[in-house]
Amino acid sequence: MLRRIIKIDEEKCSGCGLCAAACHEGAIGMVEGKAKLLREDYCDGLGDCLPACPENAISFEMREAPAYNEAAVLAAKKAKEAPLPCSCPGSVSQTIRADESFSAPSVPSCLGNFPVQIQLAPVSSPWFDQADVLIAADCTAYAYGNFHQDFIRGRVTLIGCPKLDNTQYATKLAAIFSSNDVRSVTLTRMTVPCCGGLAYAVKTAIEMSGKDIPLRIVTVTPDGKLLP
């Protein structure tokens, strides 16, 4: 059938993944660092992905395409909500009673600054003077078991999630980099496409600051592995 559907310009696509995160139907995915329309029948033609793209790489076109399959979209969403093998989320097999007591942690925290949320962190602070800064997608600390020792220790920590926070990280981070003598930046992100938005924001912030700040990006898988 002839209908309106999105078109992605791969040459303009920076691979940030924001469009994939904005697509509520799951029609867009990341393939070899580029956004792809993976399921034409999942695209409803409403274009929630268009304003999310910082490169204006997405547009509408009228062409022959399968009809929008709402039933398939809902079924795919339901499948993603199913409990994981580890009994989370939603499982009652790992419940904790409200009156259950906990012993002191055997491993000390390595956190040396607070607050850690990017939105709440001050632009100018003695923390950042000659500091190695860790910018972490908040899920990475839960996925990687030795996060404190391997990443937080010796660094000033900032966390965020571009899919949940309605803010321009690049602008805030650029102000921090411009106002302070930051020595290096380490970014930890998950494999999910929305984390590409955080990587894009950090790279953009460094460029906006006009400084040559070394950047290391570490990708964490949901089962706690570090990708090279």
Image (cartoon, grey):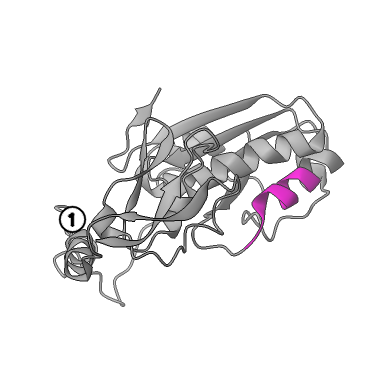
Where does the image place residue 91, in percent across and percent down from the top left? 17, 67
| Residue linked to disc 1 | 84
Q: Quadrant of residue 98?
A: bottom left
Q: Image check: 204 left or right of 102?
A: right
What amino acid is found at the position of numbered circle 1 in the picture?
Leu
Q: Image check: 87 left or right of 187?
A: left
173 drawn magenta:
yes
How many other residues sit within 10 Å of disc 1, few (<14), some (14-19) or many (≥20)? few
In the image, farthest residue toward the bottom: 98
Identity of the residue drawn at 80% across and 47% down: 175
Quadrant holding the C terminus: top left
Identity of the residue drawn at 39% across and 49% down: 142
Where does the image place residue 176, in percent across and percent down from the top left? 78, 45
**Residue range corresponding to the magenta coloring:** 167-175
Where does the image place residue 213, in percent across and percent down from the top left? 73, 27
Which one is in front, 125 or 207?
207
